[in-house]
Each structure stands twice: as C-alpha cells, then as structure tokens.
Image: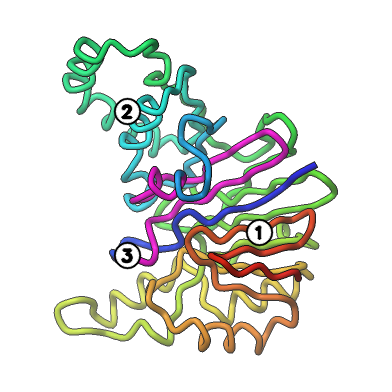
Amino acid sequence: MSFAFVCLGTGCPVATPERMGPAHLVLANDTKILIDCGSGVTQRLVQAGTRGADCDALIITHYHSDHVIDFWQLIVSSWHQGRAKPWRVIATAPAIAHLQKQIDSFADEVALRIAHEHRPSTDGLKIEFEELRYGSLAFAGVNAMAFEVDHRPVAPAFGLVFETAGRKLVFSGDTAPCDTLSHAAQNADLLVQEVFVDREMQPTPGVRSAETVASVKAYHTTPTQAARLAQEAKVGALMLTHIVPPAADRAALLREIRVGFSGPALVGEDLMRFDLVNRIVTSGSTTVAL
C-alpha cells in the first residue's frame, strides 16, 4: 500500500520562482489525483517524477484564476506526452463554465494541431466534466470526499479528504476557519492547510491598501488560526501551503505555528513529498522521518 502527498505549487497569484501556483498531487496506490492547476503545474509534475498524461483525475477546488490558469497547458502538454484517454475533471460549476471557455478559445488552434501533427490519438484532448459537490468521490484505491469550506465571496469552495492504508489526509482548500473544516480534520494524519501570514501583509502604497489586506485576510486562515485548528483537531502533522505572501519568513512562520500547535509542522515547499504510510518527508535532498 502506498499513500503520498506532493506539493507541486505552494504559491498564490504573486509570481515567484520558488513557488509555482496552487497545485498538489495525491498518490494513492496506483491512483494519481491532481488538485488544481496553477501556473507551472505541467513543469512541476515532470519534476515530481510523473506527467499530466498519467493523472487519473483533476479536481478544481474553486473558481479563482490562480487555481485554473494552466488548465489548457495541462491538457495540451499531456496530449504531447502521449495521453490517449479523456480527462476526468471534477470542478465546481463556476469553474467548469470557465474551463469550457478556455477549451472554446483554443478550438481553432487545436484543430490545426490535430490536422498537422497526425498524433496516434485525440482522446487525450477530450474532457469529461463532473460537478464537484459535497459527498463521496469515486476513485480506485482510495476513499475520497469533498466538503464545503468558507471562501466567500467565492462559492462554492471545497476541501478534500482522502483515506487509504489506514491513513487520513485532509486538504483544506482556500478557506477561512470554519466548522466543516474543523470537523473534517479530526484525527487526520496530515492536514494540508492554506495560510495567510498576516504579520507580513502590511499596506503598501501602489500595491495594497489596508482595506485590501482586511478583505483578503477575511477569506483565508492566519498562522494562529491554523495552529489552533490543528491542535484542536488532534492532527498528526500540519503542512502549510498556498502561502501568502510566498516569500514569507519560514522560520518566523513556524515559530507562530508552534505557539499553538504541539505536533510536527512543515512549511510546504514546491516538490515536497509527504509519505503518509511511513511518515517520511522528502524535500530536495533532505529526508526526515516524523
């Protein structure tokens, strides 16, 4: 049995070479589930040792540009890698409407590719949409479910639970603290939690006002809130992702978390891998057993 979680992109809309846009990968036995498709996802997949062509499904947790921006790149790149089966895309209704517009906008270009490139199959360019709703999701080798979170005014927005090999993984999605997340996170072996580092998000002339900071903070989770959630839910380990701002001081962030959470805590990095079965974290050339 195998069960691992890989950070592909731990960033946000702010561009930085260290953190690509939001994208994560669940590896459960022989099943590969991609969560969101932020900027750079196709490159990070290859760096992580897999390909878009190999993914069994894509889940889009909510309709925000940083979570869908590389959708068409993912589709075309996977086709070029030899994908010969349709994509299963599970997304919220607003996200599906947008993704269909991406498909339509490239229809003339892809028709030229198909006619000129003579690839063995065009099935990898087909997309089968399913609306993401509260409840169970059908995958081989892993039990999965979606639960609604509070990212208002963006709605609906979802977190995800995956269970296999006697282990439980909870992915918060983008959200403010909410009861549904607290309930889902109970006794998770790993909680992957988005974080808004409010200490570092100060008003900046020409970039963001005090009102901007307050508005963005209102639909995200601060380090203090993340620590409290993890502690109260008795999670085995906490991994932070979707880090706002992406250049936040990692050591200072962990110090904030440790004030409220006594368990193992990690600042997620692109290509970090968490093996839930063996409780081993790999990041670059470093491997740590928790």
Q: What is the distance, in whole Å, between disc 1 and disc 3 at their CAs?
A: 22 Å
264 is higher (above) or lower (below) than 20: below
Find out whether the residues at labels 1 and 3 contact each other: C-beta distance under 8 Å. no
Q: What is the distance, in whole Å, between disc 1 and disc 2 at their CAs?
A: 33 Å
Question: Which residue lies under the disc numbered 3?
Answer: 17
Q: Is residue 97 one of those drawn in magenta?
A: no
Q: Coloring scheme of the render?
A: rainbow
Q: State the image coordinates of residue 78 (x, y, percent, origin top left).
A: 40, 30
171 is higher (above) or lower (below) than 60: below
Question: Which residue lies under the disc numbered 2?
Answer: 100
Q: Is residue 34 one of those drawn in magenta?
A: yes
Front-most of 191 and 141? 141
Magenta segment boundaries in residue numbering: 16-45
Kind of residue at badge 1: Phe
Q: Earlier in the sequence, mark 3 or mark 2?
A: 3
For mark 1, does the 10 Å Cα neighbourhood hold few (<14), some (14 to 19), or many (20 or more) residues? many
Kind of residue at badge 3: Pro
Q: Residue 274 has which mark?
A: 1
Q: Earlier in the sequence, mark 1 or mark 2?
A: 2
In this picture, residue 13 sits left or right of residue 132: left
